[in-house]
Amino acid sequence: MFDTFRTACLAQPVTQGLDEQLLPEGYRIVSSSLHALGLETAVEPRTTVLSMTGDEEKDFTGGHPYVELGLPNDAAPNGACRVAWKRTWDYADGVDKVMTDTAVLFDPWLSFRLKAVRVSRPEDGFAVAERYDHVSEWAAPCFGGKWCRLETLLILNRKDGIHLTIKRSDPPSASGGKN
């Protein structure tokens, strides 16, 4: 997941045709409306999705990550980029330990894999739980020397499995707010 995000979202800004350059084997390019809602509009899509199935729920059910690429606009001059992945547990033994270990190690893994620095306040403590919800903001090097803001959402629970979303957006300021 981190490697996919680094390649799709941190190596370059989104440009026309980037979706075709990044398209992995077995994946296809669909509009964001088709992927999320199951319907196509007649308007040229400004956001495309690299998807295994062409459908968000089917990607999640199959455990396939997808990449969403939004073309640049005034609000996002480098375009928008997001990678999402959801996977249910396909085993029963050890799920609690995997969930706890993942919740504890997520920040160091993300920092190491993306060379990122956390800009949001970390949690004050940690307690073993049935469900972990982890939301954080980071700064990571991107586009050959610039810095980008990363927003992460990690949800872990016994019933639904793991859900991870990482989104690239505007550069962070020193205070963690927008420039």
Image (cartoon, helix red, strand yellow):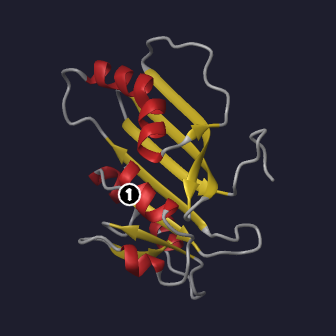
Left/right of residue 156 with respect to residue 133 in the rendered view: left
Q: Secondary structure at mark 1?
A: helix
Q: Which residue corresponds to the image point at 60% horizontal and 42% vertical from the top-left?
A: 138
Left-right relation of 148 to 48 = right
Q: Position of residue 135 (x, y in %)?
A: 58, 35
Where 63 falls versus 102 (above or below)?
below
Quadrant of the image occupied by residue 137: top right
Residue lying furthest front: 145
Q: Which residue occupies the foreground of this view, 1 or 161?
A: 1
The residue drawn where x is 71% and y is 49% is 172
Residue 109 to residue 122: above or below = below
Q: Residue at x 62, y 25 (%)?
A: 122
Residue 26 in the image: state x and y as whole percent. 24, 71
Q: Is residue 14 left or right of residue 90?
A: right
Question: Which quarter of the picture shows residue 128?
Answer: top left
* In front of the other: 38 or 162: 162
Give the percent coordinates (x, y) of residue 74.
77, 73
- Decide: few, some or many residues near mark 1? Use Cα within 10 Å; few <14, some 14-19, many ≥20: some
Q: From the viewer's perspective, tell me whether residue 54 is left or right of residue 44.
A: left
Count up the numbered dots.
Answer: 1
Q: Which residue is mark 1?
A: 4
* Residue at x 55% of width, y 79% of height: 15
Of residues 13 and 102, which is closer to you in this image? 13
Q: What amino acid type is highlighted by mark number 1?
A: Thr
Asked where in the image residue 106 lies, by quadrant, the reply is top left
For residue 98, above or below residue 15: above
Residue 58, position as x, y percentages in the image: 33, 58
